[in-house]
């Protein structure tokens, strides 16, 4: 039974614990049809969706995405890609001017097309009692992901959506409301005290014990990215407070460069190999 769209939006939560239960083909096709009906720039639909269900491929995706085991357990993973290859192939038959893969603006538009399609599918999945989670870690090893999925020139992976039936009911996460995110006519910075209050209401209730190991990791990350003075400032703040906030943990311990992640030169080489010249 379908649900009201506002009920879906208000109760959606990312799922990382899936039943080992297959999604019926007719439901999967319904979801993919919804994704393919999403709006796109110029109506060109410059995206493709690669459906991954094979156990061996899912195991490889786990390795490429910070060893997140739910990727393997879920029945389906969908890799959304920017795709200018279809237009290129059509132009080989029907010649037309084309520099879309050489400009950042068009790359950005392709990324938005893929993201809009992914979100359309996620909302449709909720309506059919399925749950989803976005996996952005795929881009850290985008070259290996492309090789695994046999992604050709003029195509670039953007985001992966893992979906299936949840093990249990999910609690929607706290979000900033429109008073924080919506600006009237021009961008307007909030008063910092009001912003910090909103931040603490959303994320500030979660606190992590300031263990020596975590404090040192945050210090080393800050030292690498910003230098000694800022690293000392981070460390002192944590020790004075007696705990690690979620931002300090996420940005200092988790969302950091790891061995095997592409650096800027690696991304440039990958883009060039795929036929995207906008980074040159």
Image (cartoon, rainbow, N blue to C red):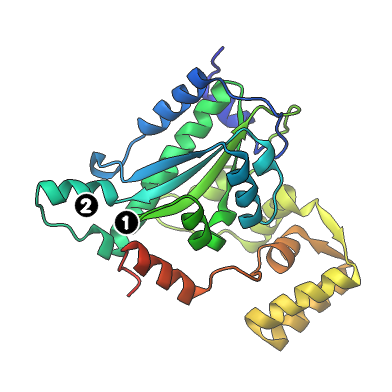
Q: Secondary structure at mark 2?
A: helix
The residue positioned 82% from the left and 78% from the top of the image is 236
Q: Secondary structure at mark 1?
A: loop
The residue positioned 56% from the left and 30% from the top of the image is 9
Left or right placement of residue 24 versus residue 44 in this view: right
The residue positioned 66% from the left and 42% from the top of the image is 72
Which sits earlier in the primary sequence, circle 1 or circle 2?
Answer: 2
Left or right placement of residue 145 versus residue 215 in this view: left
Which residue in the rendered view is the most extreme toward the front? 56
Q: Is residue 106 above or below residue 117?
A: below
User: Crowding at label 1, few (<14), some or many (≥20) Cα neighbours within 10 Å?
Assistant: many
Residue 116 is situated, as x and y percent measured from the top left of the image, at: 42, 41
For label 1, the residue is 154
Q: Quadrant of residue 231?
A: bottom right
Seen from the viewer's position, the closer of residues 213 and 154 is 154
Q: Quadrant of residue 101?
A: bottom left
Residue 182 is situated, as x and y percent measured from the top left of the image, at: 49, 47
Seen from the viewer's position, the closer of residues 141 and 233 is 141
Q: Quadrant of the C terminus?
A: bottom left
Left or right placement of residue 87 versus residue 200 in this view: left
Q: Quadrant of the N terminus?
A: top right
The residue positioned 61% from the left and 26% from the top of the image is 130
How far apart marks 1 and 2 lie (CA) works out to: 8 Å
Does the rendering let one see residue 169? yes
Residue 54 is situated, as x and y percent measured from the top left of the image, at: 58, 38
Do callouts 1 and 2 mark residues in contact (Cβ within 8 Å)? Answer: yes
Does the rendering let one see residue 185? no
| Residue 278 numbered mark, or none | none
Q: Is residue 125 above or below residue 39?
A: above
Left or right placement of residue 91 versus residue 130 in this view: left
For label 2, the residue is 88
């Amino acid at each position: 039974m379908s649900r009201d769209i506002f009920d879906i939006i208000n109760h959606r939560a990312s799922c990382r614990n899936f039943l080992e239960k297959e999604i019926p083909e007719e439901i999967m096709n319904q979801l993919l049809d919804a994704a393919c009906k999403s709006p796109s720039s110029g109506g060109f639909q410059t995206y493709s969706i690669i459906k991954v269900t094979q156990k061996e491929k899912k195991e490889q995706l786990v390795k490429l995405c910070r060893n997140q085991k739910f990727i393997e357990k879920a029945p389906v993973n969908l890799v959304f890609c920017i795709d200018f290859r279809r237009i290129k192939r059509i132009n080989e038959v029907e010649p037309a001017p084309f520099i879309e893969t050489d400009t950042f603006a068009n790359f950005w538009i392709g990324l938005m097309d893929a993201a809009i399609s992914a979100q359309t599918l996620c909302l449709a999945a909720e309506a059919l009692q399925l749950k989803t989670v976005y996996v952005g870690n795929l881009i850290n090893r985008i070259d290996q992901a492309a090789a695994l999925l046999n992604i050709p020139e003029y195509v670039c992976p953007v985001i992966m959506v893992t979906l299936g039936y949840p093990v249990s009911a999910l609690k929607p996460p706290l979000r900033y409301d429109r008073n924080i995110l919506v600006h009237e006519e021009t961008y307007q910075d909030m008063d910092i005290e009001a912003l910090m209050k909103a931040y603490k209401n959303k994320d500030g209730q979660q606190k992590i014990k300031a263990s020596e190991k975590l404090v040192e990791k945050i210090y080393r990350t800050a030292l690498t990215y910003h230098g000694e003075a800022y690293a000392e400032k981070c460390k002192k703040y944590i020790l004075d407070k007696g705990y690690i906030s979620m931002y300090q943990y996420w940005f200092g311990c988790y969302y950091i460069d790891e061995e095997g992640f592409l650096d800027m030169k690696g991304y440039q080489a990958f883009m060039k190999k795929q036929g995207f010249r906008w980074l040159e």
